[in-house]
Amino acid sequence: MKRSMIVVVSLMTFFSLCLHAQAQDKEAEKIIDKLSKTIASYKCLYFEYTLRIEDVQLNTSELRSGKVLTKGNKFKLSTGNLDVYSDGTNQWQYLKEENEVTVSLADPESDDLMSNPVGFITGSRKEYKQSLKGEVNEGDLVLTEIDFYPRDLKTPYSYVRVRINERKQVPYSIKYVGKDGVHYTIKINNYAPDSDVPDDGEFVFDVAKHQNVIVNDLRG
């Protein structure tokens, strides 16, 4: 569950970095601004991803996958045993094997990643300094690499490395370099903006469709 939620956090931070980081590097600023305008123009966005979790100290590596659908301040994320829904007002975390869902309020004013990742996307972020590292080759692709350094030295990671396909105006990957020696690398696959605008019902967990589901309602 904890690592599944890291996916939610990391993905939403990814787009927040692309959309709202305050650039000090002028060249990086131009690249991020252009990508920001492209992402902001979408009515909806669907993409699939792979997540690699590397523990440097234990010399282990784990690979996971999932998919994300967003529309405005609404989103749905599926990864492994976890589905997360948010309609902008409420948020549901559904554990499929346990047939258990936890309901909480989605705070549109909050910029806290865990309670409202969409709010974190749309909020104004000033917590990062950034530096354009240059171009790198990834197979046949030429990608632009930008490092984001958190101003808050208490964050659990040293920096975040984002790679962008500038030619297609598509975010390619993000890597969190953890201070504890655990690194998370997310690669974006099957990036499909505005391919099929979903109905708002897609972002609501329907209890009626899940027989005998256990509901933990934290909304008070």
Image (cartoon, helix red, strand yellow):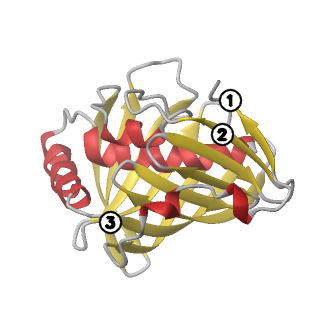
Report x, y in % for residue 166. 24, 66
Identify the residue at horizontal 43%, vertical 52% (top origin): 74
Pointer 2 residue: 103
Relative to 40, residue 123 above or below = above
Residue 124 horizontal/vertical position (percent): 27, 31
Residue at left 42%, top 59%? 70
Tag 2 near tag 1, CB within 8 Å: yes
Q: CA distance from mark 3 to mark 1?
A: 43 Å
| Alpha carbons under labels 3 and 2: distance apart | 39 Å
In terms of secondary structure, where does tag 2 sit?
strand
Q: Residue furthest bottom?
A: 140
The amino acid on which the numbered mark 3 sits, given as a three-letter code, is Leu
The numbered mark at residue 17 is none
Rendering coords of residue 62 (x, y %): 74, 58
Query: Marks 3 and 2: CB-CB under 8 Å?
Result: no
Q: What residue would you read off at disc 1?
A: 218
Q: Residues within 10 Å of mark 3 (few under 14, many from 20)?
A: many
Q: Is residue 9 left or right of residue 192?
A: right
Image position of 193 with respect to 204: above or below: below
* Amino acid type, residue under disc 1 in the picture: Leu
**Front residue (pair 99, 165):** 99
Task: In the rendered structure, find residue 143 and report the number of the disc placed on it.
Answer: 3
For marks 3 and 2, the one nearer the N-term is 2
Q: Name the one closer to the observer, 145 or 6.
A: 6
Q: Quadrant of the C terminus?
A: top right
Please identify, in this view, whether the residue under mark 3 or under mark 2 is nearer the observer: 2
How far apart marks 2 and 1 lie (CA) works out to 6 Å
In the displayed structure, would residue 83 be above or below residue 88? below
